[in-house]
Each structure stands twice: as C-alpha cells, then as structure tokens.
Image: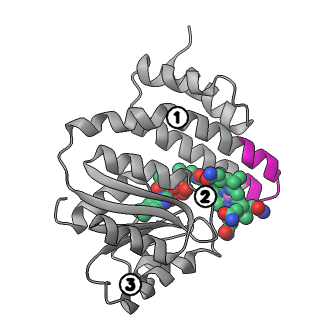
Amino acid sequence: MSTKEDVLNELLKRLDEAEPEGADELAKELLEKRGMSPVELVNALSKKLKEIGDKFGRGEIFLMDLVGSAEVMNSVMTVLRPALEKSKEKAEYVGTIVIGTVEGDIHDIGQRIVASMLQAAGFRVIQIGNDQPPENFIKAAEENGADIIGASALLTTTMPVQKKLIEELKKRGLRDKYKVIVGGAPTSPEWAEEIGADGHGADATEAVEVAKRLIGKG
Ligand code: B12
C-alpha cells in the first residue's frame, strides 16, 4: 500500500519530469485523503521547483523543461488554491493588499501563492498580475483603498523595479500612505532595507506574518 510520502514523491516526480498527467489528482489525494495541509503541500512543491530552477541555472536542463515544470505547478495550483482559500471564511477581515509581479517579469506562481495565503488569513487581495509597472500598483492601491502594496520580482534584472515603485510613491507624495512589502527568490531583507521597503517575505507564510505585523494585526 502506498503511503503519504509515496504519493508526495510521485507528485514531485511529475514536477521534476514536467509530466502533468494526473498531477492534480495526486494533489487532491494528498489533501483529501492523506491529511496533508495545503500549506505543507505548497512548501514541498516550492522547494522542488527551486531545485529544478537551480538545475536550469547550472545548464543541466533546458528552458522547455522549465516551462513544462511550471505548467505542472500551475495545474496543481488549480487544486491547491481553492483549498488554501477555504479557510478564508473563518478569517476575520484584516486589511487590503495590492499584489503583483513587477514590469519585465512574468513569474507569477509565487506571487499567486502569497495572494491565496493572504486571502486565507483575512486580507482582501487585489491581484494585478505580472509584468506590471509601478504606476499600475499605485493606481490599484488608490482605487481600492489598500493598506499594503506587495511587489514580486524573480529576476535580478527586474528587482530594481521594486525600488522604482518606492521612488514613484515618494514622487507622488504617497509613500506614507502605504506599507510596501517585497519578495521573490532573489530578494532579501537586506534588499528590502536598501530600497526603503517596509518588509520582506521569504515565503508565503512569512509574507502573511509581515503583512499582518505592518498593519498592527500580527
Ligand atoms: C517556474 C520558473 C519559470 C517559469 C515561470 C512561470 C510562471 N507563470 O510563473 C517560466 C518557464 C515562464 C520562466 C521563464 C524565465 N525564467 Co524562470 N524560473 C522559474 C523557477 C524554476 C521557479 C520560480 C517559481 O515559481 N518558484 C516557486 C515559487 C513558489 O517560489 P517564488 O517564486 O520564489 O515565491 C515564493 C517567495 O519568493 C515569496 N514571494 C514571491 N513573491 C512575493 C511577493 C511578496 C510581496 C512577498 C512578501 C513574498 C513573495 O513567496 C513565494 C511562496 O513561497 C525559478 C527558479 C528559482 N530558483 O526561483 C526560475 C528563475 C527565476 N528563472 C530564471 C530565468 C533566467 C528565466 C528566463 C529569463 C529564462 C529565459 N531565458 O527566457 C525567463 C524570464 C521571463 C520573464 N521575462 O520573466 C532564473 C533567474 C536568474 C536571475 N538571476 O535573474 C531562475 C532563478 C532560474 C535559474 N536558476 O537560472 N521561469
């Protein structure tokens, strides 16, 4: 008989080998029959995806493989997202956040996981998508009465757009109106401090903690 670990390893193998068939079913089984929490599963998948990215970085796999793995992750997220958001009904409203990936960057898997976890924690989340210039973050924040702006960057070449966002807020006299948090694999608390952001989240759990703390709800 297969154990929870067997099923999880099977799912991680699908991610590794960019084999989408049945991946969503395996995720469903882990959540519904094997007692795995959505957060635990997200963390396991994120860790594997990071390993796959490192292999790509070392030239051991091709871009096509990376795209395939991202597709598997996206299909699993269709099962995971509703599971993460289910706990939302229980959570009390804590605040509004605008979140997106910065201009020039189409990586949105992590940003969407963060959005789901924030929603589950009681935030109203305005997702503006990927490849977004600073003015779009600001426009969405103004239109929705946001408390926080969250900007994701996965490329070293797009990290400077997070800085641009803060500069743009300053230019418009809006810097004190919003808390700004940044994240994405190449970012760090030191980077956040350097660009004058209010916080950094290394993963979705930390993102929720930081966001709550910044608006006095943590
Ligand atoms: C999947 C992936 C892709 C997919 C993206 C699909 C999608 N819809 O997102 C595809 C195949 C399209 C892709 C394309 C490219 N990619 Co890519 N990709 C990755 C990979 C393997 C995983 C990223 C991911 O989803 N991780 C899983 C999630 C859960 O983790 P995460 O994103 O880090 O998010 C977590 C935290 O960072 C945090 N977080 C994230 N956002 C936010 C926001 C806030 C506000 C907070 C608080 C927290 C937070 O919480 C999240 C949840 O835990 C990484 C490898 C890596 N090590 O990151 C490379 C990687 C980021 N890619 C890379 C590259 C080079 C590219 C390309 C330029 C390749 C090319 N030659 O075309 C293009 C870029 C296109 C573009 N303009 O953006 C490099 C970047 C190198 C660098 N130094 O900049 C990496 C590091 C791979 C490598 N080692 O070389 N990629």
Q: Marks 3/1: CA distance?
A: 34 Å
- Which amino acid type is shown beneath numbered disc 1? Thr
* 101, above or below 16, in the image: below
Which quadrant would the C terminus be assigned to in this image?
bottom left
Label disc, if present, on residue 169 of the rendered structure? 3
Q: Quadrant of residue 186?
A: bottom right
**Crowdedness near tag 3: few (<14), some (14–19) or many (≥20) residues, C-alpha within 10 Å:** some
Please tell me which of labels 3 and 1 falls first in the chain.
1
Three-letter code, disc 2: His
Residue 198 visible in the shown view: yes
Q: Name the residue rendered at 69%, 25% in the picture.
A: 21
> Is residue 2 shown left or right of residue 209?
right
The kind of secondary structure element at disc 3 is: helix
Cα separation between marks 3 and 2: 23 Å
> Which residues make up the magenta segment?
55-68
Mark drawn on residue 107: 2
Q: Quadrant of ligand 1?
A: bottom right
